[in-house]
Image (tube, helix red, strand yellow):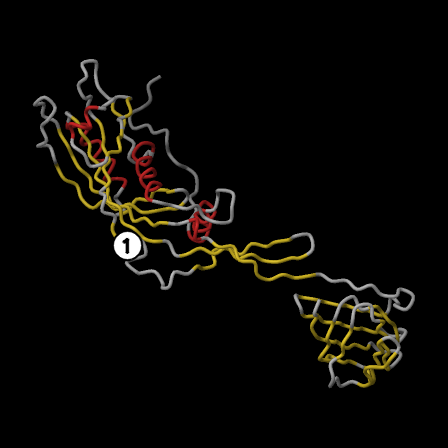
Amino acid sequence: MALPKGYRNNINILNQKIGFERRQEILDDISSNGTFLPRGVNEEDMDEAFLDFFNNDERVYLSIDGRKIPVIFLTIQRWSEFTKTWQFADEYRNIDLPFITVVRQPDIQQGQNQAGLYNIPPYRTYTYMKVPTWDGVRKGVDLYKIPQPVSVDITYNVRIFTNRMKDLNKFNGLIQRAFQSRQCYINVKGHPMPLLLEGISDESNINEFEETRFYVQSFEIKLLGYLVNEDDFEVVPTLNRVVTTLETDERLLYNDVIFEPLRVGNTIQLTFVFKPKSFPRFNFNAQYETILNSLDTIENISRIIIRRNNSVIFDGTVLTTPLIFSNNDLIDIQVFKNYLTTGKFVLNGTTTS
């Protein structure tokens, strides 16, 4: 059954992401290769993506009478050398029109991808992502750092060779629609890069195929790209948090006495809370070398006695001399407070092991 005139079967009805969601989608796409770092990009990657754009992208994909028009990537060379290895020919070995060529200009220029701004000197790296880590004992964060990409401008000349004006018009219309918003983006290994249509020219005076006249239209397209070198990426371990537990004498530590040690790196904080009606004394064994140099957050306690291996090393509420605990020292804590109130104090210091 024939479809009515003007019928379209390729309408995109999916909602496109915009704003922050679109930026996050681009970021996810950049790092979608299974690591937390973006993929590296060099000149060959940009050439490959540009060629793929004209070979497979529906915006500029050219098909004539159901046949895909071949797109060939060339270096600057003489036509006679090119035709010696030409694979698209008819049964008489004549070059079969139409076809499209892509030639990259070898003079790669300093780029405009960053709006003409230069990179920050010296050559340094910047945080790209913070990744939580866990080794079974310690929690931490690794900083994934990358340098500023190096902006480059690469100019391509795309030419269509055809002996029919209809084919020329069709390809020209595809190009005009693709660049109607000034720029058109391609995806280079997950990195979105803009293309700019710099100009359109006619070169139909070329006449080398057995004196046969044919049309040649040239499109100068500039890629505002950038280079990303994976060798310059850095993974820097940063904050590590250690969860430390201390063994205590359960016979002397009651449920209504709370002892909370917190160690982060080499710093330690010991919190003691005596609930109402609690027993005002308990002891524990120190598990590492500790230097406590401040006593604060004293609540409802009039006197504190601290013994180390049965010898009094502190008596009062103002700490003027650091308290030093060694591994396996027996530490005894005794407080004086109202029997019906909650008492609390905190010791702060550092560890050397």
Secondary element at image label 1: loop
Residue 131 drawn at (x, y percent): 56, 54
Q: Which residue is identified by label 1?
A: 112
- Image quadrant in which you'd find residue 348: bottom right
Q: Quadrant of the C terminus?
A: bottom right
Of residues 177 and 150, the one drawn nearer to the viewer in this rendering: 150
Residue 11 drawn at (x, y percent): 37, 34
Q: Is residue 261 left or right of residue 129?
A: right
Q: Is residue 350 left or right of residue 170?
A: right
Residue drawn at x 30%, y 36% is: 51
- Image quadrant in which you'd find residue 312: bottom right
Of residues 303 and 201, the one drawn nearer to the viewer in this rendering: 303
Residue drawn at x 12%, y 24% is: 209
Q: Is residue 219 left or right of residue 193?
A: left
Residue 114 drawn at (x, y percent): 32, 56
Q: Work out whether 109 lies above or below 5.
A: below
Q: Amino acid at mark 1?
A: Gln
Count of marks overlaid on the render: 1
- Crowd tier of the residue under label 1, counting other residues whose Cα lies within 10 Å: few below 14, some 14–19, many 20 or above: some
Q: Quadrant of the N terminus?
A: top left
Residue drawn at x 88%, y 67% is: 254
Q: Work out whether 313 lies above or below 210.
A: below
Toward the right, the furthest residue is 251
Residue 347 drawn at (x, y percent): 74, 76
Q: Work out whether 93 lies above or below 102.
A: above
